[in-house]
Image (spheres, rainbow, N blue to C red):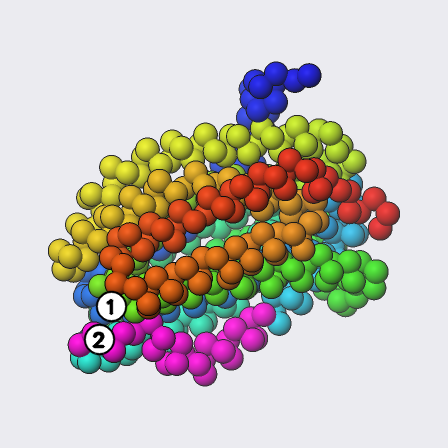
Amino acid sequence: MNTWKEKYIGTKDFYIYVLGIAVPMIIQNLITNFVSMLDNIMVGQVGTAQMSGVSIVNQFIFVFNLTIFGGISGAGIFGTQYFGKGDHEGQKYTVRFRLITAVIIMGFGFVILHFGGPTLISLFLSPEDPPEMVAATMGYGMDYMKIMLLTMLPFSIGQVYASVVRECGETKIPMYGSLAAIGVNLFLDYGLIFGHFGMPSLGVKGAAIATVIAKVIEALVVIVWAHTHPEKNRYCKGLYRGFSIPKELAVQITVKGMPLLVNEFLWSVGMSVIAQCYSVRGLEVVAARNIASTITNLFSVIYIQLGGSIGIIVGAKLGAGKLEEARDTDNKLIFFSLCSTLLVTLSLLPVARFFPQIYNTESTIKSLASYFICVQAFALPLFSFTNACYFTLRSGGKTGITFLFDFVFTWFLQIPLAFCLSRFTTMDIHILLAVVTFSEVFKVMVGYFMIRSDIWINNLVESL
């Protein structure tokens, strides 16, 4: 029988391999979130209404982004296992499926946000706030949204290529794409928001324009690299010579992928619904959550991308038929993710006091933001474990269970809890946020038993 150390601690070579996969992904997303943080801080210097308007719109962009992620994830499971099997033709079909799915989602997303923008934004505006503040927040939000819609195309196609490049083990390339975009984004942010370097002072519009240009650059780097390195990306050969996909494979991807698409959509919408529940307590809460999420998103990159690494590494082993090795690797990766996240928590807590002071807003908002950051910091290990469970289940194709894992918890526990406490009680917002956040412990318990059951250990491509 394996000792505790043998079960959860890997060798030096094991961690070198894992970090080789994870670190470029972490760096890429750290860069992306760091740019978003600086963008947010710059907008926060302009005023509270501008910051709140941008924050509300970013809730909808978040839903779109997660829906794209969910839409291409089903095909990504098969793509990862095809790569582990060495079947590049099968991998090509999964890329085609991802492209078609991304374009369809993008079309729906554009129509909904273009025509439903004012209605959606109004859901986050409390009638108890001053009318002039509500009107200003609505105006800035719509200005920002109209331009941000242009990010949908480069983001969608860029995510398709980034996902397939990562599953081939080339996680550095998307990182390079982010590095190429960061300088341009920061330069344009500073110039277009405040009117420096001879550029017009456009405020929130300037922030949106800078983001659009950065997304285009980020996508182009990955796309151009993939097509100029055919020896490493054999799926690119004949990729656009028609969009045929074997019927059996298309059906299998749809069956496995639809729960992921619906799950990511409903989970992200659920997060926005919870944010809307908090927003009924006033725009001060909206602004404070915006400040807190800006820094916590940056620190959360570690556990999120370690979870993504689980999907890549364990999925490839399952596709290669190394089932026992996949189980052993998964145990070590989950433990590594937890330990790493504990260090992140200890690093984030001291930041909680000082980060909100950067913003040009009221002291009450800054104090509330500091509290929000602390609550999120203590909850990070819980999020880390459930995220690792999600990617473990997904790597073995148990997408129906991942759907229940996320959807049922969010919509049948967290949302009713947030809705009832925010509307039907006078509970202080500090306690309310802590209660809803730490309800994640129930999801931890469910995830633990599902991983222990080994129901996720499956080779999906063996007979395809």
Asked whether the beta carbons under mark 2 and mark 1 sit within 8 Å of each other, the answer is: yes
In percent of the image, x 51 and y 62: which residue is there? Answer: 411
Q: How far across and down, in percent of the image, does residue 428 sit?
A: 24, 57
Q: Answer above or below: position of 118 versus 198.
A: below
Q: Is residue 369 visible?
A: yes
Image quarter of residue 181: bottom left
The amino acid marked with disc number 2 is: Glu
By secondary structure, the bulk of the magenta-drawn segment is best described as helix
Considering every residue shown, the one lying at the far left of the view is 363
Considering every residue shown, the one lying at the far front of the view is 425
Label 2: element kind: loop
| 139 relative position to 401: left or right | left
What is the C-alpha distance between the residues marked 2 and 1?
A: 7 Å
Residue bounds of the magenta highlight: 105-130
In percent of the image, x 75 and y 67: which residue is there? Answer: 243
Image quarter of residue 207: bottom left
The amino acid marked with disc number 1 is: Gly
Q: Residues within 10 Å of mark 2 (few under 14, many from 20)?
A: few
Q: How far across and down, in percent of the image, does residue 2 sit?
A: 65, 17
In percent of the image, x 53 and y 30: which residue is there? Answer: 335
**Residue annotated with mark 1:** 282
Q: On the rendered image, what quadrant is the N terminus found in?
A: top right
Q: Which mark is residue 128?
A: 2
